[in-house]
Amino acid sequence: MRLAIPSRPRKINGSMTSADIISVERPVTSSKIFAHTRWDFVPTLAGLFHLACFFAMYFLFPYTSLWIMIPIGFLYALMINANINGVSHNFIHNPFFRSSLLNRLFGVIESVACCFSQTYYDVVHIQHHKGNSDRPDETGETIDWISIYRHGHEGEAENPWTYVFASFFRDNPGAIDRELRKRGETELLWGRIELAVFITILVSMALIVPTWPIRFINWRYMCFFLPFFYLGHCFSYLNGYYRHYGGDPDKPIAWGVSSYGKMYNWLFFYNGYHAEHHFRPKVHWTKMEKFRQGIVEVQKQEGVRVISHAHMLGFLDPNLPKRGKAAKPIEAAAKAAS
């Protein structure tokens, strides 16, 4: 199935550009379980595997040397990053299952594995697409709550260190709650169910030491787990930073920055194709490579930024622009117009 989905109208000298109407191919399946393609069983298994690792760490900890648990914890942190930006992310844009109940239950699974609410993340991420990492307006606000420019200065992107390590603490539960209420009481209820489930599990893990006989107050495990949990979310923000740093927040086809490494995109379910994703968020991950082939010439004309490293390693890119460089063309254009 092909859909012609227009982006925001953009005209040059009164004419539509070649990027305005792009044909998008949507997968179709006869599966009774999966909504789009049977290939979605792969990210489903990845989410279940992450959940199994989450519980395995808890049960292994009392019996395993700390020197073995530390690399396992680091691996879990990397898995949080891969899950949020691969499984969970694709699940937001193209829910895997035909059954709404199965989608809700998988949302609970993702919430426990990553220790957040999938529904709350959905709100934050859709807000991200509304703003597409926009620059602050005259009041200093951005539409995108996690824009890399939101806490920057004079149109510059924020310093990556503060973005990566402070963004975890910047979520506004009140704003998320208000957006959920707009979607209806069902969304709000499921968001709270997800929060309640993962908080209950974390509190149980903090109270119960899984030994025989059972002991209580599992402070050693929480001192081990919480830093890796936080690190995993920091890795996710690091990924997010370089998926947009050097992109053009004023040009739809160049809102994101892409990276085309095969292994990276297999592990992250093609979220490396990030310029393509922001241009057409509903393109299914199995169609992303083909979609890119259809717009590659337009991308070159429009100056879409591509890096050779995985986004989490974007700081290693040899052509990384210095902060502030991206703001200068905007300032120059404004001066020319005046």
Image (tube, rainbow, N blue to C red):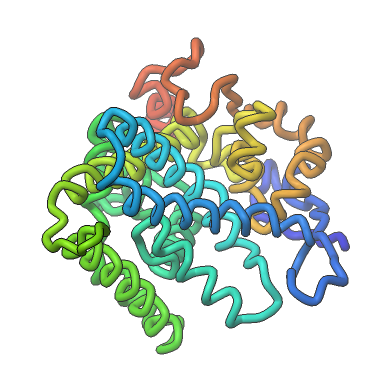
- Which residue lies at the image location 71% right of the left edge and 48% below the top edge? 14
In the depicted structure, whether residue 328 falls above or below residue 217: above
Give the x, y percent position of residue 6: 72, 58
- Up the image or down, 303 lies above or below 40; here it is above
Expressed as whole percent of the image width and height from the top left, the position of residue 184 reads: 44, 87
Residue 308 visible in image: yes
> Which corner quadrant of the image does residue 193 belong to?
bottom left
Query: Residue 223: x and y, percent?
Result: 16, 45
Residue toward you, 113 or 92: 113
Q: Which quadrant is home to the N terminus?
A: bottom right
Res 155 visible: no
Of all residues, the one furthest to the front in this rendering is 213
Q: Is residue 130 left or right of residue 159?
A: right
In the image, is 3 to the left or to the right of 89? right
Q: Residue at x 67, y 58 (%)?
A: 282
Which quarter shows the C terminus?
A: top left
* Picture quadrant of residue 276: top right
Closer to us: 194 or 307 = 194
Q: Is residue 154 left or right of residue 47?
A: left
Q: Write down the quadrant of residue 74 in the picture.
A: top left
The structure residue drawn at horizontal position 80% and vertical position 60%, both measured from the top left corner, is 26
Q: How many marks?
A: 0
Q: Nearer the viewer, residue 212 or 169?
A: 212
Residue drawn at 25 percent across, 60 percent down: 212
Residue 187 in picture, x, y percent from top left: 44, 81
